[in-house]
Image (spheres, rainbow, N blue to C red):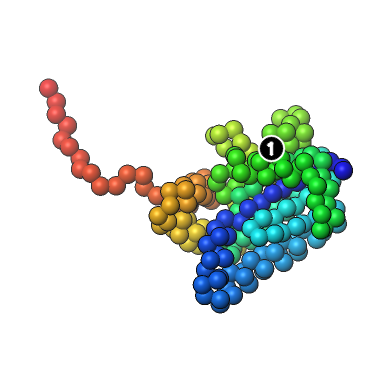
Amino acid sequence: MKIHYVAFLDILGFKSMVAREVETGDGEYLEKLFRCHEKCMDIFKSDPSLTIIQFSDSVVISRPYEVGEFRGFVSRIAQYQRYLLDEELLCRGGIAVNQHFTNGTFTFSAGLIDAYTVESTTARFPRVVISPDVIDLVCPDKNTPLELLREDDGLYFIDYLGITKTQRPKSLSKTLEIVVGDLNRSNQSSVREKGIWLASYSDALLGTNLTPQKFTGGRVLPVVTA
């Protein structure tokens, strides 16, 4: 096995899409997800060192470790995240560096385990989080690549809105409004918090005004002075 960058991505809402597909049989989500898979292959084909495996709602992207290739690796993932968003889909994920082997049908990988752990335990929101070990390797001088943002929880994630904001900006703003609105109307708090996070991210990077008002109702009482 050799040391690789390994990204594990989880397409959010996949279970409900499959349930809808089973119920209606109209092929809408199957076609949409297959388009995303084909786009993923297209985005990464310029780097022959990359390997992509998709199964169910999971996408695994890997390439041999080279410090100078990190920015290209995360930039391509940002393009894939943007394409998902254009299709009104979101993902979250983790990126790690460790030993990894795959031949297309068989995978044996410490890197995949590490990347999955980052996704499942720390990503939480629709963001692709970079393992601290990777940050130490690619940023020994503490100069963080422009492709990353550091959140107030101390985690670095791929700034896919910042990277792609000049690409169809009007369409981007409209899609974000639709996606955030759908998330915020959910009756599940875990889904709504993803919408609030995405709205906050968009407001900070794009200057939108999507973050919902935190408090509503109530009445203003008069101020009593002595």
Tag 1: residue type? Answer: Ser
Task: Check the image and report above or below for 106 versus 157.
Answer: below
Q: Is residue 123 above or below residue 48?
A: above
Q: Which residue is mark 1?
A: 131
Left or right: where 53 falls relative to 204: right
Residue 215 placement: quadrant: top left
- Quarter of the image for the C terminus: give it: top left
x, y (%) of residue 201? 53, 47
Q: x, y percentage for residue 204?
A: 52, 45
Above or below: residue 150 compared with residue 45: above
Other residues around mark 1 within 10 Å, as few (<14) / some (14–19) / many (≥20)? many
Q: Residue at x 61, y 56 (%)?
A: 11
Q: Residue at x 71, y 30 (%)?
A: 142
Q: Extreme bottom residue here? A: 26
106 left or right of 87 in image: right
Is residue 169 visible in the rendered image? The answer is: no
Please state the horizontal and vertical placement of residue 175, each as a whole percent of the image: 52, 62
Where disc 1 sits, the SS reads: loop
Instruction: Tell me which corner region of the image, top left, top right, bottom left or bottom right, holds residue 87.
Output: bottom right
Q: How many numbered callouts? A: 1
> Could you say where residue 57 lies in the image, as x and y percent from the top left?
64, 58
